[in-house]
Image: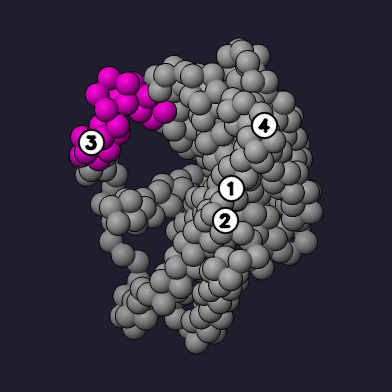
Amino acid sequence: ATRAVEGLAAAFVVPMTLAMLTSEFPAGPPRTRAFSVWGGISAAAGTLGLVVGGALVSAAGWRWIFLINIPVGLIVIVAALRVLPADSPRGGGAAASRRAFDLGGAVSVTAGASLLAYAVAQTSSHAWGSARTVGLLCGAAALTGYFVVHEAREERVGRTPLMPLSLWRNRSVAGANIVSALLASAMFAVFYATTLYMQQVLHYSALRTGLAYVPFGLSILVAAAAAPALVSLAGIRVTSILGSAVSLAGLVLLARVPVAGHLLTDIILPTVIVGLGAGTVIVPTSVAAMSGVTADQHGVASALLNVSRQLGGALGLAVIATVVASFAARSAAAGNAAAAALTAGFHAGFAVSALLVVVGLFTAAVLLREDGRGQRVNLLALQTGQ
């Protein structure tokens, strides 16, 4: 329940950051550079969290990974009050009165996604074909289907749906969200499987494990800083394909880690390659997700991109964690030692992550080529507002 409250709070805050950048910076190179800084800082902060978390767990205990967020949250509140300009809700009168919160949409999509993640995660103890798993999957499908129908009706009658389905008719927006969800699935799996590999197979401490991710975070930061130049040179589609291909190469290397792995060659090198690719993809997908979107939909488009990343990562992790556990159990049942069995499971998990990136690469090639009006999604189109 407390984690759900955390997620709800983040859902209010995080999408607004991208929406504010979209409103403050004009389309074209200035906005692309702003998205680059946004993506790089997000990646650097995530890596810093791993290092600090490892230090706290090693020195003070796991509860401190939650307690540390209290002063951080207070700093954010003070900074927001002092730095962010005060504004007021746009619109008024009858238009404002119709902007009621879409409770039905929020409940159905949250319940559907949660049920789907739970159904996948519990397949380690209940087979995919069992009545329990099939029932949970059917329930998730029913809730998701209701959400789509509900959102279409809300939009048709002129209300404010939680997720306007019209956004998905924009090929650029749809492609950016699908690619982001698939890449997030792979990234979540990298953190999950690599962390367990270092701690359970190589027997690293929590602190050493966190420090091992520093080059990974720096690689994302460097790639995000270089991505605007790539976008200007090659366009959104080519940059996204290139970044996905680089991440794929790193995941293929991770899928071959040995039982007695080395920190530099088997962990740092492949994760840095994955990070370079991921950092390259962050910028063009962020630009594409906001292109062709009207000013009053900036917040919704930003929230949709954030949801795609978080939900894609969560569902992908549920699938990959199940794959890891299943293959590790089979390997152990075949008589392999615990370390070898775990490594076999991680190999399978990284292989599934690589497959997800392959799907994302082809999605970028198909959907990010043109926007909904048949025009190429590049900085020239963004600069002219087309």
Residue 328 placed where, x, y %? 62, 37
Q: Quadrant of the N terminus?
A: bottom left
Q: Are marks 4 and 3 in contact (CB under 8 Å)?
A: no
Residue 8 placed where, x, y %? 34, 57
**Type of amino acid at the residue the image marks with label 1:** Thr
Q: Which residue matches tag 4?
A: 335
Could you tell me how far apart the alpha carbons at marks 2 and 4 are, in whole angstroms?
23 Å
Return the mark for residue 67: 3
Q: Is residue 62 visible?
A: yes
Return the mark for residue 123: 2
Q: Position of 87 compared to 236: left or right?
A: left
Residue shown at 53% from the left, 79% from the top:
146
Q: Residues within 10 Å of mark 1 (few under 14, many from 20)?
A: many
| SS under mark 4 | loop
Residue 299 placed where, x, y %? 45, 58
| SS under mark 2 | helix
Q: Are marks 1 and 2 in contact (CB under 8 Å)?
A: yes
Give the residues in magenta: 49-75
Q: Are marks 1 and 3 in contact (CB under 8 Å)?
A: no
Q: Is residue 82 visible?
A: no
Colouring rule applied to residues: one colour
Could you tell me how far apart the alpha carbons at marks 2 and 3 are, in whole angstroms?
33 Å
**Type of amino acid at the residue the image marks with label 2:** Thr
Residue shown at 70% from the left, 60% from the top:
171
The image quarter in which residue 366 lies: bottom right
Mark closer to the observer (2, 4): 4
Residue shown at 49% from the left, 59% from the top:
118
Q: Nearer the viewer, residue 53 or 290?
A: 53
Could you tell me how far apart the alpha carbons at marks 1 and 3 are, in whole angstroms?
30 Å
